[in-house]
Image (cartoon, rainbow, N blue to C red):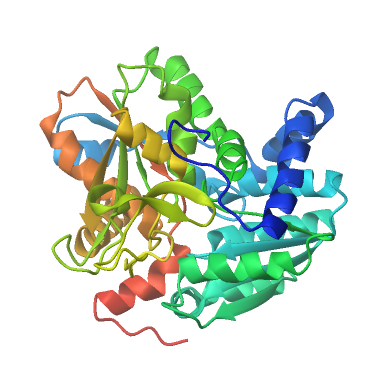
Amino acid sequence: MEFGSFGGQFLPDQILKAVKKVEEAYLKYKDDADFKQAYLDYLKDYVGRPSLLYEAKRTSGYFGGARLFFKREDLNHTGAHKINNVIGQALLAKRMGMKKLIAETGAGQHGVATATVAALLGMECEIHMGYVDVLKQSLNVYRMEMLGAKVVAVHEGLKTLKEAVDSALVAWANELDTSFYLIGSAVGPHPYPTMVRDFQKVIGEEIKTQLKIAEQCLPDYVIACVGGGSNAIGAFYDFIKDESVKLIGVEAAGLGLETKKHAATMTLGEVGVIHGMKTYVLKDEDGEISEVYSISAGLDYPGVGPEHSHLKATNRVRYESITDQEAIDAFMLTSKLEGIIPAIESAHALAYAYKLIPTLPKDQIVVVNLSGRGDKDVKQVARYLGHTLVD
């Protein structure tokens, strides 16, 4: 196990051999000076890092209480944090001699980032996406196709992120010698959760540096949404040893925790195995992986990254949940107060922050990781609010 009693490699032999090759390559290159420099150069010159740390003064004033800052991952090229990880894994795949990237996506941002970097590096690209998510995120599907990717709509099961992962794994098993499975979140068998964390930890590192320069202090709170958990672990990791910094992950309560229409894995889940890892999962009455729901295509996953499970088990991170309605309210309020349209995923973290900051002293600092922009969600929010948009 990699994270206390969580993590591991629970895989059939064929896939395990391929994962072991990824592990060997990552151990070889992760501290290689040329590899690290190439990664950092792309983050600076292509992604546009460091992303801004912005004080949301109008929102702070609206609620009173603590000062609120947004970590602007929405300003990255492709509009989310996902590209930080994709560049790292794609550079690794190139060094392994692979010709093709295979990936899953929920909200589509990881798919767009993967298709973007495949185009950048001259690689083939195949993206698996649940059909329900294809319908929710049709704009992102077309963006992937414009970038040269093949998008595979998955019609099995609930037709969402879990099924997309299953489908991508099957596709990878048929092309192990020439393709690389590029996981988008901090989930899956070792070394993927560690690898994704290492490529996303730049978020928290930048928050720490930027706040020390601007305010000569650490934040009091760092808040991020959690589905699989890559943006959250990226924001949290550099603060784990700083016990004065409270870390809060926010997952999807959907239509309510009292219903079966939610994806609140940390709140209501139990330990199990999913997609090659031991972690918290949502199970039904028969002990099988349960159906999940969220208005957010990026949060409707019945598991969570194993490092998050460890952080929950050790009480280092607190995990809360936010309903669809609360997220939509935060989505709209942020747009109107700050002129920033957040991703629905990020709006879950914002909604919790909007509950928290009025209860805190005015000298405290709350940082919310704004993991993505909401252009992709405008049609869905409009439908939710009863508006019809004409193409």
Q: Nearer the viewer, residue 358 or 324?
A: 324
Q: Position of residue 363 (x, y in %)?
A: 21, 19
Q: What residue do we see at 72% from left, 59% from top?
A: 14
Total labels: the figure holds 0
Q: Nearer the viewer, residue 285 or 178?
A: 285
Instruction: Find the residue positioned furthest to the top.
Output: 216
Q: Position of residue 218 (x, y in %)?
A: 37, 18
Q: Is residue 224 left or right of residue 194?
A: left
Q: Is residue 385 left or right of residue 63?
A: right
Q: Is residue 62 above or below residue 283?
A: above
Q: Position of residue 297 (x, y in %)?
A: 42, 66
Q: Nearer the viewer, residue 70 or 124?
A: 124
Instruction: Find the residue positioned furthest to the right.
Output: 97
Q: What residue do we see at 71% from left, 32% from top?
A: 40
Q: Is residue 199 left or right of residue 310?
A: right
Q: Quadrant of residue 344?
A: bottom left
Q: What residue do we see at 82% from left, 54% from top?
A: 121
State whether residue 53 appears in this view: no
Q: Is residue 190 left or right of residue 65?
A: right
Q: Position of residue 273 (x, y in %)?
A: 44, 53
Q: Is residue 347 above or below residue 35?
A: below
Q: Nearer the viewer, residue 84 or 176?
A: 176
State whether residue 255 appears in this view: yes
